[in-house]
Image: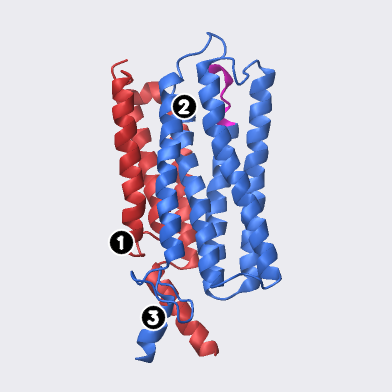
Chain colours: A red, B blue
């Protein structure tokens, strides 16, 4: 019984790709990125034109780290990814068009 | 053959209800949760876009630059981020069939979520006392609507987590316990992901 449970756990770790320690490492990495984001917000003038793209890249890294590893999309069926990305792409596309129509980027 | 059976039962996303097969070979519950989260992208996308559009529509002394408390919000963000870690540890424990640790991690997640909501209530109260009401400006309306909707999602998540802890304690979780915990986890992580966007787009990028 114990062997069966161990085997199940091994298969779980294998299919999900990460151990508990792996999740802790990712959480530490995410916390560091959050710290860097806050530093960015206080050094806006020094960073100049790099401020906005830098902040957006850090945000995107955090976003994808959570959905790929914590939500297991990296290791799960592609159909789950498809369901989520369809909604996400639809939302981004729809609201970029909306904001463009409202002259958001122009102003 | 035996190995294949174990692998199929424990493979991520596969429905391991005894004798329950789906046409996709995947868990219908999990598929439905991902579709729901995809649709939630549209809801929060609309709220974030509306805030972006109206964030400059405020009086001279009650705008984002005057009211934001970045260190406080950063601490709240850190708390919610850590709740994602405890949630994923709960899912991991559930897959190991370790009920005790599953309940502990779910409870810690609910506690961290409560701390985040308490911080949001404190923040809203502070803003209100400074004169920023819901109808003060288009900026305040869109800000309270966006962060309020997120706060409601976190609150619903906390209620679900505590219900799940109670159900596990009474051994009344229907179907596969590990998958149920994983579904709750997906919702919780999504709430965290939305806050990652809000924290950067609303708080860190100046109006």
Residue holding disc 2: A42
Residue B179 x %, y %: 50, 68
Residue at mark 1: chain = A
Disc 1 from disc 3: Cα separation: 18 Å
Q: Are marks 1 and 3 in contact (CB under 8 Å)?
A: no
Marks counted in the figure total 3
Stretch in magenta: B65-71
Q: Residue at x 38, y 79 (%)?
A: B8
Q: Which mark is residue A78?
A: 1
Q: Earlier in the sequence, mark 1 or mark 2?
A: 2
Q: Which mark is residue B7?
A: 3
In the rendered image, the vertical position of residue A31 relative to residue A101, given as above or below: below
Quick one: label 3, few (<14), some, or many (20+) residues within 10 Å? some
The answer to whether marks 3 and 2 sit on the same chain is: no
Chief secondary structure of the magenta span? helix
- Please identify the quarter of the rendering in which residue B129 is found: top right
The answer to whether marks 1 and 2 sit on the same chain is: yes
Residue at mark 2: chain = A
Q: Is residue A63 magenta?
A: no
Disc 3 from disc 2: Cα separation: 50 Å
In-image side of B148 versus A86 (left or right): right
In front: label 3 or label 2 = 3
Quadrant placement of the N terminus of chain B: bottom left
Q: Is residue B67 magenta?
A: yes
Residue B118 x %, y %: 68, 39
Q: Residue at x 41, y 36 (%)?
A: B45
Indicate the secondary structure of the residue bearing disc 3.
Answer: helix
In the rendered image, the vertical position of residue A61 relative to residue B120, given as above or below: below
Indicate the secondary structure of the residue bearing disc 2.
Answer: helix
Quadrant placement of the C terminus of chain B: top left
Indicate the secondary structure of the residue bearing disc 1.
Answer: helix
Quick one: label 2, few (<14), some, or many (20+) residues within 10 Å? few
């Amino acid at each position: 019984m114990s062997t069966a449970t161990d085997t199940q756990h091994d298969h779980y770790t294998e299919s999900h790709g990460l151990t508990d320690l792996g999740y802790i490492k990712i959480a530490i990495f995410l916390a560091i990125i959050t710290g860097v984001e806050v530093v960015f917000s206080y050094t806006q003038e020094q960073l100049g034109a790099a401020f906005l793209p830098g902040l957006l890249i850090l945000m995107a890294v955090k976003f994808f780290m959570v959905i790929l590893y914590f939500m297991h999309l990296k290791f799960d069926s592609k159909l789950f990814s498809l369901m989520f990305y369809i909604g996400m792409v639809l939302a981004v596309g729809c609201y970029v068009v909306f904001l463009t129509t409202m002259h958001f980027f122009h102003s | 053959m035996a190995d294949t059976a174990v692998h199929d039962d424990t493979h991520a996303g596969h429905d391991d209800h005894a004798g329950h097969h789906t046409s996709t070979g995947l868990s219908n519950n999990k598929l439905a949760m991902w579709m729901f989260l995809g649709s939630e992208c549209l809801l929060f996308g609309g709220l974030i876009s509306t805030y972006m559009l109206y964030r400059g529509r405020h009086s001279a002394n009650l705008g984002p630059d005057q009211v934001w408390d970045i260190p406080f919000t950063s601490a709240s963000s850190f708390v919610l981020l850590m709740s994602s870690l405890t949630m994923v540890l709960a899912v991991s424990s559930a897959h190991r069939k370790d009920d005790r640790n599953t309940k502990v991690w779910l409870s810690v997640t609910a506690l961290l979520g409560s701390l985040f909501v308490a911080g949001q209530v404190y923040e809203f109260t502070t803003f209100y006392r400074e004169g920023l009401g819901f109808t003060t400006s288009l900026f305040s309306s869109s800000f309270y609507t966006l962060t309020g909707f997120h706060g409601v999602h976190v609150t619903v998540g906390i209620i679900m987590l505590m219900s799940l802890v109670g159900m596990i304690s009474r051994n009344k979780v229907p179907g596969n316990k590990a998958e149920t915990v994983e579904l709750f986890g997906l919702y919780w992580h999504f709430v965290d992901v939305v806050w990652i966007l809000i924290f950067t787009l609303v708080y860190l990028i100046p109006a």
